[in-house]
Amino acid sequence: MREQVLTRLEGRTPAEALEAGVEPRVVWHALCDALDVPDSQRWGHDTRRPAPPAR
C-alpha cells in the first residue's frame, strides 16, 4: 500500500491515492490489475460478495 507506485493512480501509491480522495474501488482495482489478481479472487472466497465492478 505504501510502496507500490501505480501508473493507473497517476504515479501514486494506493495509500497516497486514498489520502488524495481517490475512490477505494478505483484503488482496489488498480492494485489488483497491477498484481494480476483474477476477477474471481478480488474479493476473497465469499461467493455472495463479488468485488465491486471497476468504473
Image (cartoon, rainbow, N blue to C red):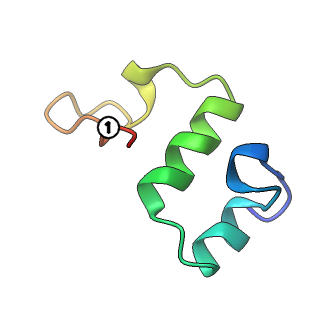
Reply above or below: 32 against 10.
above
Residue 26 at what x, y percent from top left?
A: 49, 52
Label 1 sits on a secondary structure element that is loop
Locate residue 48: give its quadrant: top left
Circle 1 packing at 10 Å, graded few (<14), some (14-19), many (20+), is: few
Give the side of residue 14 with respect to residue 42, left or right: right
**Residue at left offset 42%, top offset 53%:** 25
* Residue at 59% over, 72% down: 18
Q: Is residue 41 above or below residue 12?
A: above
Q: Position of residue 40 (x, y in %)?
A: 38, 20
48 lies above or below 11 = above
Residue at image point 39% right, 39% down: 54
User: Is the N terminus in the top left, top right, bottom left or bottom right quadrant?
Assistant: bottom right
Please state which amino acid type lies under the numbered disc 1.
Answer: Pro
Q: Quadrant location of the C terminus?
A: top left
Mark 1 highlights which residue?
A: 53
Q: Which of the 4 image quarters holds residue 51?
A: top left
- Left-right relation of 1 to 33: right
Q: Position of residue 17 (x, y in %)?
A: 65, 68
How many marks can you see?
1
Considering depth in this image, is 43 or 17 the residue closer to the camera? Answer: 17
Which is more toward the observer, 23 or 15?
23
Side of 11 where 53 appears, left or right: left
